[in-house]
Image (cartoon, rainbow, N blue to C red):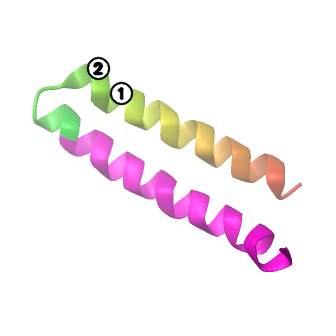
Amino acid sequence: MKGIANAAPALAMIAAFACVAGGAVTIRRGDRRKGVLMLVMAVVLVGNVLIWTM
């Protein structure tokens, strides 16, 4: 179980970068609401990683 706990922040950061990229693409395609929600989700994921690493 320790391996999964060590990998969780790294996976969350990868997901956050993917959400930023996906949000930017979605905003450029014209669906602003979904794009902004993806960017907000990325901020929440980064905040969670910061809390986990403290």
Q: Which residue in the rendered view is the most extreme toward the right?
A: 54
Question: Which quarter of the image is occupied by the N terminus?
Answer: bottom right
Q: Residue at x 20, y 37 (%)?
A: 26
Residue located 61% across and 37% down the image? 44
| Left or right relative to 15: residue 26 | left
> On the rendered image, what quadrant is the C terminus found in?
bottom right
As drawn, the label of residue 36 is 1
For mark 1, give the secondary structure. helix
Neighbour class for label 1 at 10 Å: few (<14), some, many (≥20)?
some
Position in image of residue 2 (x %, y %): 85, 76
What residue is shown at x 29% (from left), y 47% (from top)? 22
Q: Amino acid at mark 1?
A: Val
Residue 28 percent coordinates (x, y): 14, 36
Disc marking residue 33:
2
Question: Could you give the CA–CA distance between mark 2 and mark 1, rounded to whole angstroms?
Answer: 5 Å
Q: Tag 2: residue type?
A: Arg
Q: Which residues are magenta?
A: 1-25
Secondary structure at badge 2 equals helix
